Amino acid sequence: MLPPLFLPLPTAVDRSYSIYFQQLTDLPNLMQAHGLKNPQLGIVTDKHVEKIYRRKVEAALIAKGYQPRWIVFPAGETTKSLNHLSAIYDHFLGYADRRTPLIALGGGVIGDLTGFAAASILRGVPFIQVPTTLMAQVDSSIGGKTGINHTVGKNLIGAFHQPSFVLCDVDTVQSLPVREWHSGLAEVVKHALITDETLFDTLVLEWDAVLNRTPEVIAPLIRRSVEIKAEIVSKDETEQGIRAYLNFGHTFAHALEQVTAYKTFLHGEAVTIGMIAALYVSKYQNPEFPFEKALDLVKALPISAAIKDLDLQSLTEAMKVDKKAQAGNIRLVLLSNIGTAYITQDIDPKAIQAAWMFALSSF
Amino acid sequence: MLPPLFLPLPTAVDRSYSIYFQQLTDLPNLMQAHGLKNPQLGIVTDKHVEKIYRRKVEAALIAKGYQPRWIVFPAGETTKSLNHLSAIYDHFLGYADRRTPLIALGGGVIGDLTGFAAASILRGVPFIQVPTTLMAQVDSSIGGKTGINHTVGKNLIGAFHQPSFVLCDVDTVQSLPVREWHSGLAEVVKHALITDETLFDTLVLEWDAVLNRTPEVIAPLIRRSVEIKAEIVSKDETEQGIRAYLNFGHTFAHALEQVTAYKTFLHGEAVTIGMIAALYVSKYQNPEFPFEKALDLVKALPISAAIKDLDLQSLTEAMKVDKKAQAGNIRLVLLSNIGTAYITQDIDPKAIQAAWMFALSSF
């Protein structure tokens, strides 16, 4: 028998990157600073975002000699599909080479879809995230998770693909529908709950200004929230450990989204309800947990969706098939204190049942 | 203005792996040795390979408690499509979690397609390469390039995704159609030409036994050829430098394949003609190059395809749009000696023209 061969792959390619808090019109300057000087580029967005920002971004790019080619999709989760991915391939491969950047201008749907396209075209072309929703800024644009949905479930097809850089223009959140603003805030509150009691206290103190999007109040809070996400990702890119803390409230949220076929709740709304359930279990596991204090802030997150006709058994079943569940065991992120998370699989099913009932009756 | 954030990603995940020269029936033992103990697994193959090896592989897997689920596609290049990728998603997502392995049993088409599916399902599931053609054993299964074709060109959609291990059963090449054997040998000769004069001399010495697939002669030659590919990949996984040496003859070959719509030549046949052209240019650039010696071995590679009606201008144009061309410049891998390659862009267009004429009139 011939001896085996070993193929060592020692090279650590540095995929570290920066997140800039500048204006959309700084995009071409940042591209030049990053050596992305190819005049051709593809820019993917949705119809809503196109209406508000295309003219401005296009003018800035053209003024610096870029030739942006736009790929515009309908707004909404159904755009994260193999068909739309294929449409990017068809468009972009008509003119792209390995140095042609692909830019995502929009929310999480556009960022996830475009990121996976950038990961898979020519085995990777330069990718730039320009998130224009709060949810995308503080969560989905950071950390390199890209992908599309499958009929079996969300985000089941995708890749880890880090961008060349992220341009986060915090002013863009002023144009968000109020429901999307609240949805994004759920992730900001989550970041505070899992890692940062100081951020939690600031949110409590400034909550009215936060809800009203007072620019000078929200800018540093958005930046801090991005920083928390970035710190967690840089410690655990591929979710072997602490990146799972970011799923606080999400095992419940995914169940809610699934049993309502993703039609009733915005993601952040489902996360809000999920966090209430997770706070309940946190207290169940540890009576010392400052439940009321945490709950007050989470319940201050407005929810526009009507909560009704939700079947407890379907919700519990749906939790078990969450893609982060292992071998049917429900694995939850809980809090030992505000700002301190942990993961456990050792949970009394009765606690989960009671948590659902508590959360669903909170609104 | 808020200061930018830096997201460091220092973790070097070790993706090194082994290539085993054992029998197909050792697959379950190797899986267990690699901690892949999930009974569920997906195994992708084509109809030809299924006919010869399914029963044997299935029995071995079942005997060790595995529950293989087969995904069988038509043989041939058209299987490397988005539709077939989508078919794997539909099948595999019905039962897979992040630890469910996806196995490619077959040639390069099956390996490339399955590898990209494994890269993109749940952002990466364990992947095992079991190459059953010489071409796949010495070339496509090694190095993590995976992908599918697009109407614009071949391999334009894909990812770098390294397998958990490769199982190379050299006995499987005995069942290859003779034309595919010769096609794979073109890559073995290429490996000798670009890096290993000793292998070259052995091939010359043993050529009759090589053509006849004498087991004890070809086994060490296949292993050495795999080793060359592995050495190059481990030095330059993402083709920033010396991995490009593997494209010796390929810029010409891709042009040939493209102008004949991938219908006339097997890949190795196109590479054989491409290597003759590249040897010609090597001599043009350096009159000291041992052209005749190299040419004798390359011309000993049988080609079954009929070479006719090829238009020189179309071939030259096609070379310029090869995806490895940069900004329209033809970049070629040439030899300074047998076993020593280099890359150059500084080539007289007349030399390329003359090389085409020489190569096409060689058969």
Image (cartoon, coloured by chain):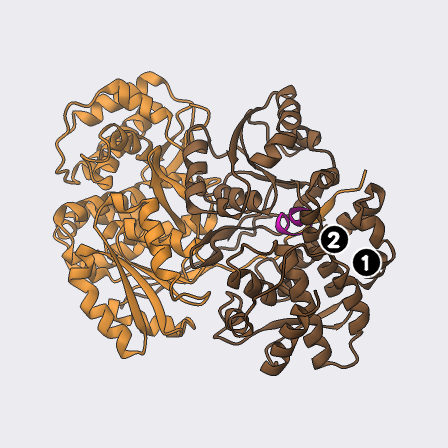
Chain colours: A orange, B brown
Query: Are discs 2 and 1 located on one and the same chain?
Result: yes
Proximity of marks 2 and 1: CB atoms separated by less than 8 Å? yes
Residue B339 in picture, x, y percent from top left:
77, 66
Picture disc at residue A331: none
Name the outermost residue toward the top.
A350
Which of disc 1 and disc 2 is earlier in sequence?
Answer: 1
Residue to which mark 2 is pinned: B225
Q: In terms of depth relative to the viewer, which is nearer, A27 or B197?
A: B197
Residue A89, above or below B80: below
Does the stretch in magenta take in A289? Answer: no
- Asked if residue B248 shows in the view, the reply is no
Q: Main secondary structure of the magenta part?
A: helix
| Quadrant holding the C terminus of chain B | bottom right
Picture disc at residue B199: 1
Q: Residue at x 71, y 61 (%)?
A: B190
Q: Residues within 10 Å of mark 2 (few under 14, many from 20)?
A: many
Residue B53, above or below A222: above
Q: Secondary structure at mark 2?
A: helix
Q: Is residue B173 left or right of residue A153?
A: right
- Residue type pointed to by label 2: Ser
Q: Secondary structure at mark 1?
A: helix
Residue B95 in picture, x, y percent from top left:
45, 28
The residues bearing labels 2 and 1 have C-alpha atoms spaced at a distance of 8 Å
